[in-house]
Amino acid sequence: MNIQVEPNIEAAASERDMANAIRALTMDAVQNANSGHPGMPMGMADVATVLFNRFIKIDPAKSDWPDRDRFVLSAGHGSMLQYAIHHLIGYPDMPIEELKRFRQLGSRTAGHPEYGHALGIETTTGPLGQGLATAVGMAIAERMMAARFGPKLVDHHTYVIAGDGCLQEGISHEAIDLAGHLNLGKLIVLWDDNRISIDGPTSLSTSMSQPARFKAAGWEVRIVDGHDTSDIAQAIEKARKSRKPSLIACRTVIGRGAPNMEGSEKIHGAPLGADEISATRANISWADESFVIPENVACAWRSIAIRGRRARSAWQARLGSSRRRKGFEAAIAGGLPRNIGRNFSAFRKRHVEEATEVATRKASEMVLGVINAATKLTVGGSADLTHSNLTVTEGLGSVAPRHFKGRYIHYGIREHGMAAAMNGMALHGGVIPYGGTFLVFSDYARGAMRLSALMEQRVIYVMTHDSIGLGEDGPTHQPVEHLAMLRATPNLNVFRPADIIETAEAWELALASEKTPSVLVLSRQGLPMLREAHTRENRSTRGAYILREAMGERDVTLIATGSEVEIAKAAADKLMTESSVRAAIVSMPCWELFEKQSEDHRRSVLGNAPRIAIEAAARLGWDRWTGDNGAFIGMSSFGASAPADDLYKHFGITADAVCSKARDLLRGAAS
Amino acid sequence: MTAREKHDRMANAIRFLSMDAVEAANSGHPGLPMGAADIATVLFSRFMSFDPIHPHWPDRDRFVLSAGHGSMLLYSLLYLLGYEDMTIDEIRNFRQLGSKTAGHPEYGHATGIETTTGPLGQGLANAVGMAIAERKLADEYGSDLVDHHTYVLAGDGCLMEGISQEAIALAGHLKLNKLIVLWDDNGISIDGAVSLSDSTDQQARFEASGWETVGVDGHDPDAIAAAIERARSSDKPTMIACKTTIGYGAPTRAGTSKAHGSPLGPEEIIGARKALGWTSEPFEIPSEVLDDWRVVGLTAGKKRVAWQERLDAADATVRGEFERRMRGDLPAGFESAMAKYKKQLADDQPKVATRKSSEMALEVINGALSETIGGSADLTGSNNTRTAQTAPITPDDFSGRYLHYGIREHGMAAAMNGIALHGGLIPYGGTFLVFSDYARPAMRLASLMGIRSIFVMTHDSIGLGEDGPTHQPVEHLAALRAIPNHMVYRPADAMETAECWELALADTGSPSTLALTRQNLPALRTEFDKDNRCAYGAYEIASAADDAVVSIFASGSEVEIAVQAKSALEANGHPTRVVSVPCLDLFAKQSEDYRNAIIGDAPVKIAVEAGIRQPWDALLGYDGIFVGMNSFGASGPYQKLYAHFGITAEAVTAAAESRLHDHAGRK
């Protein structure tokens, strides 16, 4: 790769113009939308110009080239920086019209960069700190892929532009500690040190020495004038040679160029207004009309794409002659081996026949044994609960500083950082990340889990200890409302399997869901085998199914998930023997998939008899399935600290409680 | 006996109670209490101010066990010091149903537990709030009445969690020098050595945040004492890194992850008895050791007597106000101030966003209440959380009533919990509703503890417009409503906003979230009511012209849409009623009769909310119609988004008429 570090004098002059092009497009687009954030793009225009002009390796014509550098705009409100650059470099889907439609319905130029809306947007940002933490995952994936396929095929940098907000958010701590620990030397963070936040100067709320903080986390730190192009270039050049991740603190002026507003919070998040725009044009000597870029400046920007195209062609040639080509392409495609379906089916058949009775977290571990042996794509991990989440399988090998051949990551006690890193790994490609913690701590990870769903990434969350069934640790560790919260999230499949068979089915579905993240909600406590016979069909595919039909016409339908299906089954047996009540049992491992079925199918499963739902969790949402005269057996408060069996009795989640509720309902229906 | 011998046997009392209780429960975490026993013994025997007989004494030092899994450390201390409700039977019943000794320390279960901990990092972040409250009240009432320290025992996990960064950055910025964190630096996490996942230099990190730090041998009592002494005279918060051995005293498990979270087993305990020279039976503390501890409790209590004398000598008005605020009662003039304001609203009928309505209500509230303390996570001008009365608090001046929490939603929520727990102040703090995701673990704890933290969450739907889906809450109302004991209010206009604020402030047993709009809303409640109608959770805001055939339920900004749809439907001859639902949680608490009356028996039921359907299922049943969101939002001007996602009066009208048509067809 041929990188020009010292530009000639003409180019230096033009770098200023190139940066001003970003400023002008930003002002115009924000003004046109009458909404948006001009301050950050104007302040970081010089840094971004140097980064793209001298370093970054991308090819707009092949924006998903696997060995491209990743650029993450963690300070996502500065989206116009990214859109302006994309337009200038010549991404085919970012014509000037898109910039004119900034923040309008249906445009590619959303208020914050949205993954999938336009080429070259590597991740959705906006919720602060997420981009930085996602970039850590990208940089991990780069190291892992490089370890597997060699530097000829995988050798790229991850660059992040982060603002004060990104660094104040707690997730940044988890991210930078993990990056520092793992010596992610190809991760370079450019901090827009403009000292302005929305409320006013950052000194209102922080006195942090960010350089010292990053050093404490094992990073290399440089401080530069963010408007001095050669200063910036030298720092990036040195950072690229570092074996540690690098922070470059770029001292900038927010809204640089706007004579009356620069350096103030007023320019952070509102249009400049026509007068200030005119004054800025005069100030930066920018004579052109709105949305017009002079040809020499446009030319300079487009030459970046030429450099990128050459680099990609060279890489393509290396790939073509590589003996690892097939494996590499398969990994990037993310496909699972063709025989994996057979493996799943054989696994289910064996365990039905053996009537294996285990906690679903244990079942998950057993399934993972099959998966991790069948594909090299999976990368496991846990937020310091490996032996509780049961997320590691034999021979996976741990990732450690300078050792990236393993496939298991000790994420530390960093649920949020883990989830965001998994997003980054999934976005990077070549790996399928899964990671574990207790279900209750999905609260900590939620900011990033939502983004998995919004970005449609195949990230698999292994959430164990899924109810009061965890016992003595008590209410702080017992999820109650978490299923409701996760089910409420659009495009997130929540699986709560009832036995080892459903666990295998859930894993199979999760791996196949390339556009939807999945949460596997698993028990701590042992569960029986509920299936009576093996079926080739994955019965969880439709979200809910009749586990056992009533003998004759249904008097009542018992609907349950996970560990409570066992209770439903016991209740159905009791109802028959004690009261000759005919109960059907519906297992409903995944609401989201059930909701996608036809109305007729749903009715056929749920039936017309009174329905009782049983789940050791909050009721919210269950009325949808139980209907007007249904009932719910579950939690209506936080849990408590005690052995699990005592808790189930205490909170009345028992077969007896189900039976008595069923009799009540039937009496009500009869009267 | 030397002082060291005395110390050792006192510390060993903690170790053996912990071992024995975990063994008896066959569950729990012996490693931390055994490793940190020396630290805790030094802290309590030489420094802490508290009174076991008056555990709620306002000027006590606060002790927060942020590493809550080490709960037996705290329970052992409370028993040994003579807290009356912490009997040896409670220790024997560790982790059993109905005991005060839950797996993790639960606020309210036993006296002396200052906050619920267990989710890592929360205790540390709560403590920051407690230390803020101390400084604030000291500024108001003087050091005669308020002058205490906040001590935290934190583990590696607490310091790895992101919330710790928000907490320590805020504490360092505000120079909370009476906050002292003792870090149990045992180098062990659950998966194994901390070095598996962490290489951070914690002391350098805290120093970067403006803290004083010192490293000590966590098993050397004098070194620990010297460090605490130094910390107490610092003008910055202090972190004392205490190098310890997890499970200290356990012959084979000490220093390994095997000591962390499971019983040691009888053999290992025998070994520990031998190693530490402890001959008593399980749960038995030699009387001379118990005496040593009880003397500590009695001595510490003397400081309370002196404090009580100072309080008694204070000006009667000051004293009365101090005591009222510590009780958490609202002042006498509050109700009438709000009544006057609501009458004004009935006259003015302002068309403003509910975030603005909230600011208007806060002007009245902050004028009538001296105890509110506002703030925002760097969205002050958007959340409208600042009023004329609330000057900012700065590192050197705590006379203000407003906290710039920084871009730290999680740290803010946890600090608010700490402020509420401390007492004497009512915290409210703002961010965008979508960022309740970031604050959620702390919001859950507010609910679990049943404390009065008030979360002001603006920009509550796609109505925020151009910022797009990352900033538009969709599932958040559902997610918050699902939390037990969490009151979610979504007022429809300025009057409802005032009522919801009244309810939130009066509710001493639950936290509240106010979900507020960015966009303007018309006044729908145009008459003054003495009765707070929002107190019912849902009420009929517009009745049908005749026997209703359609009931529309809506909250917040969608009540306007519901009212418009009602007009359209009635114009087409379909009598329609509208139910405003500012708080589903309160509605669920009403009598069945009331609920049935409000739900009504109109054949067509429609709920309208620019969020997801889930919370409405209980009202709608299987057949009800929901008009709202079923995907993430989009970036665009908000009116276009409402049209795009079909949340309009026309859509509601059409859905109702289509269903009425089906019904007619079936007949």
Image: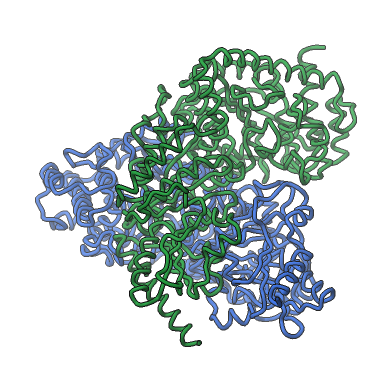
Chain colours: A blue, B green
| Label total for image | 0
| A115 sits to left or right of A620 | left
Q: Position of residue A667 (x, y in %)?
A: 73, 73
A128 sits to left or right of B442 = left
Quarter location, residue B185: top right
Q: Quadrant of the N terminus of chain A?
A: bottom left
Task: Report the residue at 48% width, 56% height from top.
Answer: B476
- Residue displayed at 59% across by 60% down: A483
Residue B91: tell me if it is visible.
yes
Question: Whole-percent x and y of residue A118?
Answer: 33, 64
Q: Nearer the viewer, residue A12 or A472?
A: A472
Residue under the point 48% across and 19% down: B235
Measured along the vertical axis of the image, is residue B198 above or below residue A89?
above
- Name the spot of residue B51 as percent of width and height, x first: 68, 22
Q: Quadrant of the C terminus of chain A?
A: bottom right
Residue B285 relative to residue A144: left or right: right
Residue nearest the observer in this picture, A101 or B2: A101
Q: Quadrant of residue A656?
A: bottom right
Does residue A34 sit above or below B8 in this rendering? below
Q: Nearer the viewer, residue A602 or A75?
A: A602
Q: Is residue A153 visible?
A: no
- Relative to residue A584, is residue A23 depicted above or below? above
Residue A606 x %, y %: 63, 77
